[in-house]
Amino acid sequence: MPTTEKSPRAFARDGAAAAARSAAKAFWWTANGLAARALTRPTKGENAREFRSEAPAPRRNALRRAWMEALAKDAADVRAGVYPLTESLAPPTQALDRALDFLKDARDVDRRRRKGDGVEVKSDPKTSSFPNYYRQNFHFQTDGWFSEDSALRYEAQVEALFSGAAGAMRRRALSLLAKDLVEADQRDLTILDAACGAGAFLSDLKATFPRAKVFGADLSEAYLSVARDRSGAPCVQTNLERTPFADQSFDAITCIYLFHELPPRVRPVIAQELARMLKPGGVLAFADSIQASDAPELARLLEAFPVFFHEPYYSTYQELDLARLFESVGLEEVAADQAFLTKARLYRKPIVSGVA
Ligand SMILES: C[S@@+](CC[C@H](N)C(=O)[O-])C[C@H]1O[C@@H](n2cnc3c(N)ncnc32)[C@H](O)[C@@H]1O
C-alpha cells in the first residue's frame, strides 16, 4: 500500500478528515436529493409513477444505520491506511454549479419517468451502432451514456440518490482489493477498471496504487473523456463483451455497478471476458447493488428502485447467483463485504499447476 511510510498520527488525521468530508458530502447530497424530489414529486400528480409491493417498508433506522455504516467503514479504512484519503470537497462555486445543473436536469428526468420513456436515446442516429440493451436512458438520465453533459452530471446524480454515500460504497471493492494486494510490489501490477464510467472509482484506484499501471475501459467515449480528465489514467473504449486486451493481461480487474445494467444473456459473456483477461492468481474486485437476500429488511426499496430509475435488467439481477456465475468462468470467491446498498466480492482466478 502506498501509505505505509506515514505516522500513526497522520493515519488518524486522514481518518478524521475522511469522516468530516463524508459528513459534509452526505449533508450536501442529501439536501440536493431532497430538493430534486421536492421539485419533481415523482409519486404525486399527473402520471405519477405507481409502485406496489408486498414487502414491508424499511424502518428508517435500518436504512440510516446501513448508510452510516458505509461512511464509517470508509473512514476506518482510511484511518487504517488500507487506502488513502481520496474524497476531496469541490470548491464552493463548482459544487454549486454541479448542484444547479443536477436540479435543472431533474425535471427532464422526471418527465421521462412520468412517460415511462427509458429509450429516448434510441431515436438518436449516433447511438445506432451500439448494442440494443445499451441504447437506453438508464435512470431516465438525459442522453443516456451518450453525451459529455451526462458524464459530467453522473456523479451528482448517484451521490444525490445515495445521500453522499456512493463513493464510500464503491470503495468496499477497493478495500477488498487493497487488502489482497498489500504485499505486492505496485510497480509489477497492471490493473483495469472495467466499465469505469466517468472515472470516480478509477481515480480512487489510481490514488491507491500510484505506482501500478492503471487503465479504464468503457463503451461510452463521452464518459471516458471525463474519466481521463478526472483520473489521468489511460482509458480504452471497448465493449466488454469482447475487448482488445490479450489473455492474462491484468493482475487485477475492478468492475463496479455494471452487472445490474446488463441483460441476462450478456452477463456470462462479460464474466467470461473478465476471467480471460486476468492472469492466473489475479483477482476481480466486484461491487454492485445488494440483492434482497443480502438485506431482506430493504427488499421493498430494491423493488422500487427499477420503477423510479429505469433499470430494465435490475429484477433479473436480483435473482442472479453471482457466486455461480463467476464460478462458471473459473473464478473463486475469496472475500466479501457489504455496505448500505452495495455488496462487494473478491474473486480469484486460480493458478493451475503446470499451466503458465
Ligand atoms: C452504472 S455505470 C457505472 C460506472 C462506474 N463503474 C461507476 O461506478 O460510476 C455503468 C457503466 O457501464 C458501461 N457499460 C455498460 N455496458 C457496457 C459494455 N457492454 N461494455 C463496456 N461498458 C459498458 C456504461 O457505459 C457505464 O459507464
Image: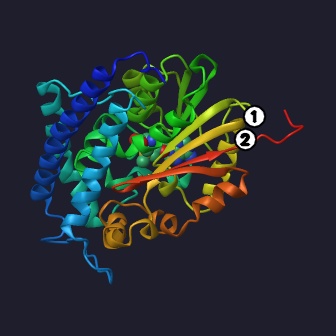
The residue that disc 2 covers is 276
- In percent of width and height, residue 83 lies at 41, 30
Residue placed at 42% from the left, 44% from the top? 172
Q: Is residue 159 above or below residue 305?
A: above
Q: SS at mark 2? A: helix
Q: Is residue 72 above or below residue 268?
A: above
Whole-angstrom CA distance, mark 1 to mark 2, is 5 Å
Q: Position of residue 56 (x, y in %)?
A: 28, 79
Report the side of 338 relative to 309 (left or right).
right
Is disc 1's CB within 8 Å of ligand 1?
Answer: no
Task: Mark 2: give few (<14), some (14-19) or many (20+) Cα within 10 Å.
Answer: some
Colour pattern of the rendering: rainbow
Question: In the image shown, does 348 or 57 lie closer to the viewer?
Answer: 348
**What residue is rendered at 44% in x and 65% in y?**
294
| Residue hosting label 1 | 247
Q: Please state the horizontal and vertical placement of residue 251, each as a whole percent of the image.
A: 65, 31
Query: Given the image, on which type of amino acid does mark 1 rest?
Result: Asp
Q: Is residue 299 above or below residue 213?
A: below
Amino acid at circle 2: Arg
Q: Residues within 10 Å of mark 1 (few under 14, many from 20)?
A: few
Which dot marks residue 17? Answer: none
Asked if the residue under mark 2 is in contact with the one under mark 1, i.e. CB atoms within 8 Å, the reply is yes
Q: Earlier in the sequence, mark 1 or mark 2?
A: 1
Q: Nearer the viewer, residue 136 or 188?
A: 188
In the picture, which quadrant includes the C terminus?
Answer: top right
Q: Position of residue 108 (x, y in %)?
A: 22, 52
Which is more toward the observer, 116 or 287?
Answer: 287
Residue 290 seen by the camera: yes
User: In what element is the residue under mark 1?
Assistant: loop
